[in-house]
Amino acid sequence: MATIKIKQIGSPIRRPAAQREILIGLGLNKMHKIVERQDTPEVRGAIAKIPHLVQVID
């Protein structure tokens, strides 16, 4: 299965708790951290909810 690289570009400070939980669920907790996840609809949905905090790396 394909993978996707996700980079955190925004801070979770002063963001709603739900957005912070999505970042933690993706495995992101520090600025500019990059994680590699399976490219599934669940991961894509999580990215779609916080596009201002994360960036998909090609």
Image (spheres, rainbow, N blue to C red):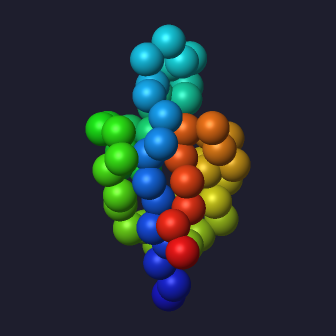
- Residue 39 sits in which quadrant? bottom right
The C terminus lies in quadrant: bottom right
Query: Residue 15: x and y, percent?
Result: 54, 18
Q: Is residue 23 visible?
A: yes
Query: Residue 41: x and y, percent?
Result: 65, 65
- In this rendering, the answer to whether 24 lies above or below 44 is above
Residue 57 relative to residue 41: left or right: left
Q: Is residue 22 visible?
A: no
Residue sitting at 30 percent across and 38 percent down? 30
Residue 14 relative to residue 45: left or right: left
- In this rendering, the answer to whether 5 lies above or below 34 is below
Residue sitting at 47 percent across and 78 percent down? 3
- Residue 52 sits in which quadrant? top right
Count of marks overlaid on the render:
0
Q: Nearer the viewer, residue 18 or 11?
A: 11
Query: Residue 51: x and y, percent?
Result: 65, 44
- Residue 31 sits in which quadrant? top left
- In this rendering, the answer to whether 36 lies above or below 11 is below
